[in-house]
Amino acid sequence: MIRQHPFFSPLGCLSSLVILVGIVIAVVVSGGAIFSPGLLTAKSESGVTINGFSSHADFENDCEQCHTPIIGIEAARCENCHASVAEQRAKGAGLHSRFTNVTHCGGCHADHKGRNFNPTDMALVNFDHAASGFSLASHARNYDDSPIECGACHTGAAFAFSDTACADCHGAHDFAFMVDHAAKFGGDCISCHDGAGNLANFDHSRVFPLDGQHAEIDCEACHVNKQFKDTPRECVTCHAEPQIHAGVFGLDCAACHSTAAWTPAALKNHAFPLDHGEGGEVACAVCHPNTYTEYTCYGCHEHTPQNISGEHTEEGITGSRLENCTECHPTGREHEGGD
């Protein structure tokens, strides 16, 4: 007599069938809860109900709310409730649109760890804040060296970042600066600042035009150690004045120099006609015998200071006005003087 294999005997097959049917019934009745690795969280936003649920614990026996059989957790099922995350992914904007593993919800938001477990807090433990578009490189500690808590910036509903958080913190440290800064650039701080000392979407021309050669220099050339407040704007701060230039041309650099290049220089803003209306330019030294920031009209005219003083005094022109000939004679002609 040949003994039957225990797995394929009538009794073995019947037992297997009974166990299988029992599992199916248990799954149907419990919603799959028999496979649950633990209790779901009962944490929730106070008073907030989504699709009839106030927390994950409300659908603990309905595993298919999050799990797809065989596949596991799917983002689409989570987003049936968390619609704001779906909107962020669809529009490519917002916090969740920045993550490469955004479809793997369980990678950041675990559950089945008890009623008091907070899935959001767990996600923040190993959260790379730079992925949100704002680094905490310069925001780990307050001005008094105390740690900056998340709630200091995320004061809005559902842990949302508050636009006023920056002004509240920095304004408490330097109120005058923040008032002036907000007046110039507005209150949307993170549209320019990334938290690591770099600027984005910042119109530098509102402070100092970066054209010509200035467009090619590194930020650190002017903002040493990433210091932006009170950065000098005068040319001489970066461009040392040549000895031959010193004390002769003054500091109105833009009158001769352009941002295209420091050299060669050209006299660009000479309002007084260089030909003096006589045809042909006169030599610079005729009008500027000492420095180019001062001029005289006695270098070529036949009049004398005494005669000019007498004639102009009759017209009520005396003192400093008498020496400022171009105020009344912008082209140097005798009879163009006004009142």
Image (spheres, grey):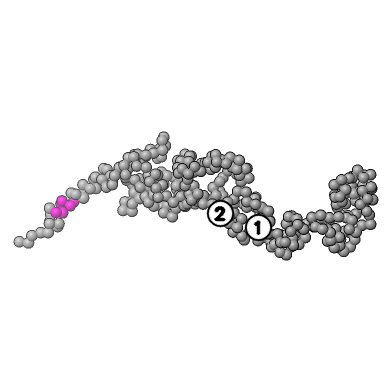
Residue 288's quadrant in the figure? bottom right
Name the residue beneath numbered marker 2.
225
| Residue furthest out toward the top | 47
Q: Amino acid at mark 1?
A: Cys
Q: Where's residue 149, x and y in %? A: 45, 42
Count of all numbered marks drawn on residues in the image? 2
Main secondary-structure element of the magenta-colored stretch: helix
Q: Quick one: quadrant of the C terminus?
A: top right
Q: Residues within 10 Å of mark 2 (few under 14, many from 20)?
A: few
Q: Amino acid at mark 2?
A: Asn
Secondary structure beneath dot 2 equals helix
Residue 177's quadrant in the figure? top right
Residue 224 drawn in magenta: no
Residue 98 lies left or right of residue 109; in this view the side is right
Residue lying at 75% horizontally and 57% vertically, measured from the top left: 247
> In the image shown, does 162 or 272 lie closer to the viewer?
272
Name the residue beneath numbered marker 1.
238
